[in-house]
Image: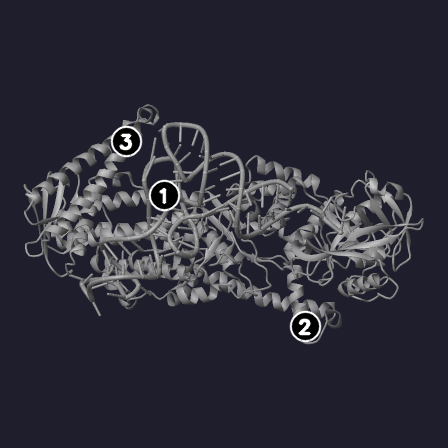
Amino acid sequence: MKGGSGLRATLFLDKFYLPQESEPKWYKRWEENGFFAPHPGNGKFSMVIPPPNITNVLHVGHALNIVLQDVITRYQRMKGKETLWLPGEDHAGIATQNIIVKKIGLEGKTKEELGYNEFLKITWEWAQEYKEKIKDQIKSMGASCDWSRERFTLDEKLSKAVRKVFVSLYKKGLIYKGKYMINWCPSCGTVLSNEEIEYENEHSEIYHIRYPLQEGGDVVIATTRPETMLGDTAVAVNPKDERYKDIIGKHAIIPLVGRVVPVIADDYVDMTFGTGALKVTPAHDPNDFEIGKKHNLEVIEVLDDKARISFEGPYKGLSREKARKAILSDLKSAGYLVKVEKYDHSVGHCYRCHTPVEPKISDQWFVSMKSLAEPAIQVVKDGKVKFHPERWEKVYLNWMEDIHDWCISRQLWWGHRIPVWYCDDCGHLTVSETDPDKCEACGSTHIHQDPDVLDTWFSSALWPFSTLGWPEETEDLKKFYPTDLLVTGFDIIFFWVARMIIMGLEFMDDVPFHDVYIHQLVRDKFGRKMSKSLGNGIDPNEVIQKYGADAMRMTLAMLAAQGRDINLDERAFESYRHFVNKIWNASHFVEMNTTNVKIQNVQGLTMADRWILSRLNVVINNVTNALESYDYNIAAHEIYDFFWGDFCDWYIELSKVQLEDPKLRENTQQVLLYVLQQSLKLLHPFMPFVSEEIWSNFFDGFLINANWPVERPEFYFQDEGFDFLMEAIRGIRNVRSDLDLPPSSKINVVIVGKLDWPKDSPFELYISKLVNAESVGTARMKPKKGMTAAVNPNVEIFVVMDEHFDFNAEIVRLNSKIVKAAEEFRKLDARLSNEEFLKKASPDVVEKAKNERSEIEKTLKRLDSTLRKLKE
RNA sequence: GGGUGUGUAGCUCAGAGGGAGAGCGCUUCCCUCACACGGAAGAGGCCACAGGUUCGAUCCCUGUCACACCCACCA
């Protein structure tokens, strides 16, 4: 242990802790000493980071994610486990490509003008830049992840894993290519998976349009998308619909187009909706596509990749919006438009650019999910993968049990190229882990690779094992797979969590992680989502700059209650910056009073010592249990309340008395040091920087490597009435405040009754110090001019003052105490008079109530007699 | 159309089957020898509403209302 003379006085003399100086220094030291790398220990703990997208710097939601992971990582490391938290970033296909397209767009260029290679070069530069920025941010948050194992989804090794998985699934027949109705984003120019569509409610209109029948008469259909009528190849009605019975089998003539199409009958048509007659456009609507297949209808595409009309005629080249207007106006003037009604419905949008998605038939690659999903359902049902909070399990299972095939090809440049080569001669597909130079069927060298890339989430799905070296059988893979925990947000349960479980089971034959902690969404203080357009985002860089990383971490941990979103008010950070400072100053106090003291066995403890040591034991247990069950907010609250509410507010104050007593001084120093030491350990996962800084001024080694505290049975002591001591002190202060006595004025305290505070403790001094009393004494009788401060069944405590005594005030005081106690007594008595209660309530509850009643009864008697005497 | 979550002090939120808590804000006092990023004393709540279960419910059940969110192929 370092002596007082060795302390860095400049730091400790500062009134305020300066995180901006301390934090980078400690991060560097931890990193240089290799503390973030796993070291053999008692069991292992491993976790992979949800790789942030390189599209942007991190926001406060990421900060929450990082902090929650680091709290657990540091806790597990201190518990002595071989601990690995593996960091990395995601290439984020569509999102990144969009950013680069926009960026070069500002310079007036398109990606086609730039060319494939140049475009990728620019994107890689961006990726490098943002990887560094993100890394710096994660570091500034204090994250103790092992940077020597950092991975990027486009790393060469990870790309190999991607290829191996693709080839393997292809050979098993689980990856296939085919023409299906898919979601097309006309702005991003690529297909999207179902999960990448966000449905939004839109106020729109539904149009009733009259289609003449070839055989005479007409039929009115209802549609929200009149522009697609160019591609209509049927009109459908419900076979049970009496209104349309006669026209089934007849032919409708599409207005403006003149195409003659059949009127067909299909159960799908809802008779109650619209007019009960449906126009069928197999090329541009998923339902119509199904109907089309069933009835063998012609498929006529009328929109191109940019959602412009491609159908020959007057509308060709118009955007879908303009085409709608033009067609409606033409319909109207030709008398086909029967009616327009307001109509709200939900429309799918691209999750990256928010453009309305266009349903379209396209030739794409898919993963067949049904068989892969089955084991992934089972492991969750069997509890091999547990969700926290549990309710997310249902969300996961619902999705898994109704899973659809996963469209994995994307018409992008940025990403993993699909490892498929087409033979120009024989048409064979060569699917290979390594680039082939000839067709594996006919040997032709005229082959070309599929131009598309894979969905970003395809590589993310492999993250828990690809980052550990798979497909090579590395030491890391053997040691750290399966990982123990995944911490992520609910918004990517389908995108990511589900697919990792699927891929882990398929390729590692084991779950990728045992626990999934789903954390909250961080919203603004009004409960709104943080977004660029609202400008209500909170930048973690700024928060760290202003309040320090420790304050930010503690704030987020305190708010991280399971199962609820966090409405974050920036003022919260200030509270916990104050807490950081409180820790700093309390440590300062301990430091000043424990020069040249070493922690060793302590004997001759006082009631204050015994109380704080008992409390510490309880808190150690509570914090540990809370962390084991990922109750971050509970753990953080426990240590916060203990350190500030118990240690600072009471023990340190009482220690001032004990330090002045030569007989008690040394023990008190021991207890101060010990409690501080254990507290620093409990604080460290939440506030690593300040705790390490303080630790370095007291103790050898690094706190990051210290042992996690365990309870000490010898430090459990039975209740000695410390609560009543606190109550007495509060009561005396209350008298002061009630009578407006200045704090400087001296008062005298008199204790009447049978006191059961332990004789080995200077409780008179405790009281006099904490209430600034002239004297604290005992008496047999209530003093004449005494104000009642505290009462229990055996003892009354009075504040005696001759000149300030206020008869009326004392009457009021006593009366209010009596009213309160009487009310309490009445309630307890009513309960205890209820025979049902006595019969059915658990014995200990009854026992407790009886005890309380008798205590209050005695207290009441005391109060009554005091009041009587006063009035004499 | 299904499903989930939430409704507790002015604000942001904890909480447990036995009679309600924190932080911030507010009022009053104090720069007392760790800390004014502090200390002390207070005010402030039919724990959304209505039923039910229970000896007892703010906590469990049912329904209602409000606010979020997720899923689903309503043209």
In the image: residue A20, left or right of residue A464 = left
For residue A288, above or below residue B59: below
Whichever of callouts 2 and 3 sits on the residue coming sooner in the sequence is: 2
Q: Residues within 10 Å of mark 1 (few under 14, many from 20)?
A: some
Q: What separation in Å lies between label 3 and label 1 (alpha carbons)?
A: 35 Å
Instruction: Read off the residue under disc 1.
Output: A622
Residue found at the very far bottom of the displayed protein? A107
**Tag 2: amino acid:** Ile
**Tag 3: amino acid:** Ala
Chain of the residue under label 3 = A
Q: Position of residue A525 (x, y in %)?
A: 46, 59
Residue at point 58%, 44% (across, down): A512
Q: Residues within 10 Å of mark 3 (few under 14, many from 20)?
A: few
Q: Position of residue A350 (x, y in %)?
A: 68, 58
Which mark is drawn over residue A165?
A: none
Q: Are marks 2 and 3 on the same chain?
A: yes
| Residue B33 placement: quadrant | bottom left
Q: Position of residue B38 (x, y in %)?
A: 27, 60
Q: What separation in Å lies between label 1 and label 2 (alpha carbons)?
A: 55 Å
Whichever of callouts 3 and 1 sits on the residue coming sooner in the sequence is: 1
Tag 1's secondary structure?
A: helix
Instruction: Read off the residue under disc 3.
Output: A830
Q: Are circles 2 and 3 on residues that touch, CB within 8 Å?
A: no
Q: Are circles 1 and 2 on residues that touch, CB within 8 Å?
A: no
In the image: residue A785, left or right of residue A446 = left
**Tag 1: amino acid:** Asn
Tag 2's secondary structure?
A: helix
Which mark is drawn over residue A104?
A: 2
Pick the front one: A133 or A349? A349
Chain of the residue under label 2 = A
